[in-house]
């Protein structure tokens, strides 16, 4: 996925939680991300969302969402490229993951 500088990008990870409580962690490369004024992270129902505000060239890279519950964890990834100027908002939907391990 490609986004222009100074735009906002929304990454979404949908999952089947099997009725269990889950936690979501976002990573850029191998480094776990934390909420800030530049990164907004939410977990609602069966969807984890990461919003990157005012995208910069340094935001380019691979983003991963890890969903975990008491029975296991799973991860899905998306690659973000940042290019010249434009006036659009991008969305990347990471593939649906089931995190129940029997």
Image: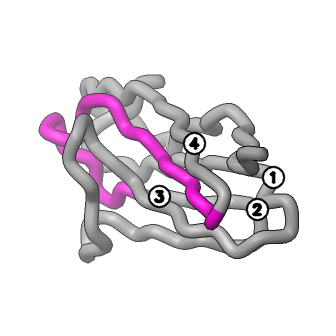
Residue placed under numbered mark 3 in the picture: 50
- Tag in front: 2 or 1: 1
Q: Which residues are magenta?
A: 52-70
Residue placed under numbered mark 4 in the picture: 74
On residue 61, the disc is none
Residue 95 image-quadrant placement: top right
Residue neighbourhood size for the residue with mark 2, other residues' Cα within 10 Å, grouped as few (<14), some (14–19), many (≥20)? some
What SS does tag 1 mark?
strand
The residue sitting at 25% across, 26% down in the picture is 84
Residue placed under numbered mark 2 in the picture: 46
> x, y percentage for residue 46?
76, 62
What SS does tag 3 mark?
strand
- Tag in front: 3 or 2: 2
Marks 3 & 4, CB-CB < 8 Å contact? no
Alpha carbon separation for disc pair 2 and 1: 6 Å
Residue neighbourhood size for the residue with mark 1, other residues' Cα within 10 Å, grouped as few (<14), some (14–19), many (≥20)? some
What SS does tag 2 mark?
loop
> x, y percentage for residue 39?
32, 64
Alpha carbon separation for disc pair 4 and 1: 11 Å
Marks 4 & 1, CB-CB < 8 Å contact? no
Q: Name which of mark 3 and mark 4 comes first in the sequence.
A: 3
Q: Is residue 101 left or right of residue 64?
A: right
Front residue of 101/99: it is 101
**For the C terminus, which image quadrant?**
top right
The residue sitting at 70% across, 74% down in the picture is 21
Q: Is residue 53 left or right of residue 42?
A: left
Q: Is residue 52 left or right of residue 5?
A: right
Marks 2 & 1, CB-CB < 8 Å contact? yes
Alpha carbon separation for disc pair 3 and 1: 18 Å
What SS does tag 4 mark?
strand
């Amino acid at each position: 996925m490609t986004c222009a500088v100074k735009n906002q990008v929304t990454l979404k990870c949908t999952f089947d939680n099997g009725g269990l409580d889950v936690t979501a962690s976002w990573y850029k490369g191998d480094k776990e991300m934390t909420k800030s004024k530049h990164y907004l992270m939410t977990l609602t129902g069966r969807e984890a969302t990461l919003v990157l505000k005012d995208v910069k060239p340094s935001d380019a890279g691979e983003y991963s969402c890890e969903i975990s519950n008491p029975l296991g964890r799973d991860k899905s990834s998306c690659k973000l490229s940042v290019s010249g100027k434009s006036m659009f908002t991008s969305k990347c939907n990471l593939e649906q993951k089931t995190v129940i391990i029997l």
